[in-house]
Amino acid sequence: MEWILPKTGWNADSRMNTVDYNRIKNNLQTLSDLVNEVYCPISLENMGADKGFTDWFYAREFNVFERNVDFINQMAFFEDIGVMKTFFDNGPFIDYEELNRIESAMLVFFNKAAAQKKTLPRLALTLGGAKGVKV
């Protein structure tokens, strides 16, 4: 999956749609893959159908987002990203402040992990005499 720039300008008039949901879900998976590559092996909690979201939003899905962002933070970054919230069906829907918190944290994590990945040591030599193949 490819990283999609998160929306960090949510406001009181913003409304979440399936594009936003799928962006958050896919970015969490991309971030997980990057953390696996750079820091440590992790496995995120499953968020449902692999094809993305196309129907109604449920509280449990946003709770999974919250837990996954918190888990990534605890495993690799140790940043102060605010307080994780829990949502309930037929309760208040996720608000713009929480969406800003989640997507901003993911952006910070991605930028740190991508910068760290660039600094990983690489061997600058050819092994086995294969021309043009560098490790």
Image: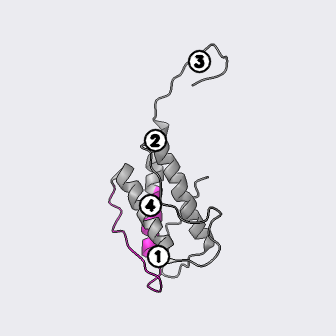
N-term-proximal mark, 1 vs 3: 1
Q: Position of residue 130 (x, y in %)?
A: 66, 16
Q: State the SS at label 3.
A: loop
Q: CA distance from mark 1 to mark 4?
A: 19 Å
Q: Name the mark on residue 126.
A: 3
Is residue 96 inside the magenta stretch?
yes
Q: State the SS at label 2.
A: helix
Pointer 3: residues within 10 angstroms few (<14), some, or many (20+)? few
Q: Position of residue 102 (x, y in %)?
A: 44, 65
Q: Amino acid at mark 3?
A: Thr
Q: Amino acid at mark 2?
A: Val
Q: Nearer the viewer, residue 51 or 19?
A: 51
Q: Name the mark on residue 16.
A: none
Which residue is located at x 62 percent, y 61 percent?
50
Pointer 4: residues within 10 angstroms few (<14), some, or many (20+)? many
Contact (Cβ within 8 Å) of mark 1 with mark 3:
no
N-term-proximal mark, 3 vs 2: 2
List the residue tagged with mark 4.
68
N-term-proximal mark, 2 vs 4: 2
Pointer 2: residues within 10 angstroms few (<14), some, or many (20+)? some
Q: State the SS at label 4.
A: helix
Query: Would residue 98 be visible to someone looking at this image?
Result: yes
N-term-proximal mark, 1 vs 4: 4
Q: Nearer the viewer, mark 2 or mark 1?
A: 2
N-term-proximal mark, 3 vs 4: 4
Q: Nearer the viewer, mark 3 or mark 4?
A: 4
Q: CA distance from mark 1 to mark 3?
A: 51 Å
List the residue tagged with mark 1.
96
List the residue tagged with mark 2.
38
Q: Which residues are magenta?
A: 79-107
